[in-house]
Image (cartoon, coloured by chain):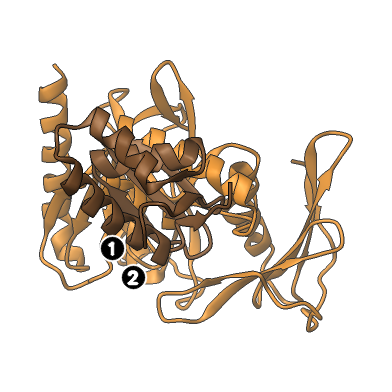
Amino acid sequence: MQLTDRFTASDDVVAREVGGEMVLLDLNSGQYFGLDPVGMKVWESFQERPQTLAELGDVIEAAFDAERERIEADLLALAAQLKDQGLIVPSAD
Amino acid sequence: MEWKPEPPREQIALDSEPYDRWVSPIGASMAEFHRSQDGYLLRFLGQADFEVTPDDQEGDHRIVGWPVPGAKPEQIVNLYHNAIQPLLGNHTGGLFLHGSAVSVDGEDGAIAFLGLSRGGKTTLAGSFAAEGNPFITEDVIDLVKRDESYWLQPKRSKLRLFADSARFLLGEDTPIADKNTKQDVEAGDVLPFAREEVPLRQIYILGTDHRAPLQIRKLALQEALSALMPHAFLLDVEDKARLKGHFTRMADLVQDVDCFALDFTRDYAELPQVRAAVLASFAERCLKSD
């Protein structure tokens, strides 16, 4: 996975913030997933529009106090998990 | 939702494969959900078939039910009230859960107990009723949100109990028609019924380990949401738009009503301690809100 890869939230996932975290329900598998505040920001961004991980890095950098290098490493790891679970899907535009 | 049972008919094999099933805790198929030409065919194995069809003119649903030959008349009525109504209720934007509930301290609020079939919900609600906390519903939690509260709607004034539970609650000399099936026990002086809607204050989800020691644990909101979803009535698990709406309503619910995991040994002798623990938890909530 690379920072230039572009993703969007899957239409088969419903998400809702409860108690300061994001709960995702995969409607195909019936599985639940939890995201912390950073993950929630990532998810909300993917829901707004398709975007690259580099673009997402800008969003996270603006919202949280962390080094860019660390943000990008965490984003790559999180995106890989979300993609493996089918929660985000590649997007061409 | 108007309906009436048709004459009995056999449950002949269907051409379609079910898109969903209800399975008992021991893995037996209890109900199959099929698509029909215009709607749904719900088959409660060995009991009845229901055909549910959208009524375009009224925005409602047309319901036709056929008991199997030899079924007791109350069986199809119970299925209508405890399955068809809540399934359609959620399908049309309501909030229905599988559980029993009791009223505590008059109008102060209600406690709901959710759990799998044969998990002890009705016996627990009945034991609360026998000790002066009227039951509001035996199998279907029907919630209406109004004035910042979820109002629990009273359902039928009867409990459906197996023989041993009926005798525990009503006395050893209670007449039993059939030891192997649940029977309807009407509310009365021994088992009082709450006839008015009551705001729901707490939800207890009964654990599946029937030998577990008594324990009450408050669930985090995220945990509560995923714990509640399996206890909802869903007519069409493939209708993603409706699933999304239902998930949102459940998320709203867990943010307004505290949810707990309740474990206890399924032994009638344990019920007084279970009631005391639940009431203590309820009282703690009241103290915090004062």
- Residue B229 or B84: which is nearer the viewer? B229
Secondary structure of the residue carrying tag 2 is: helix
Q: Quick one: which chain is orange?
A: B
Label 1: how many Cα within 10 Å (few below 14, some 14–19, many 20+): some
Does B100 sit above or below residue B285? Answer: below
Q: Residue B37, which numbered label?
A: none
Which amino acid type is shown beneath numbered disc 2? Asp
Chain letter belonging to callout 1: B
Location of residue B275 in the rendering, given as x and y in whole percent from the top left corner: 17, 48
Q: Quadrant of residue B193?
A: top left
Query: Does residue B111 appear anywhere in the picture?
Result: no
User: Within 10 Å of the Cα at label 2, are there few (<14), some (14-19), or many (20+) other Cα atoms?
Assistant: some
The percent position of residue A76, horizontal first and vertical second, equals 30, 56
**Which residue in the structure is indicated by mark 1?**
B168
Colour of the chain lettered A: brown
Query: Is residue A50 shown above or below B269?
Result: above
Residue at 28% x, 46% y is: B222
Tell me, yes or no, whether the two marked residues, 2 and 1, touch with CB atoms within 8 Å. yes
Q: Which residue is mark 2?
A: B164
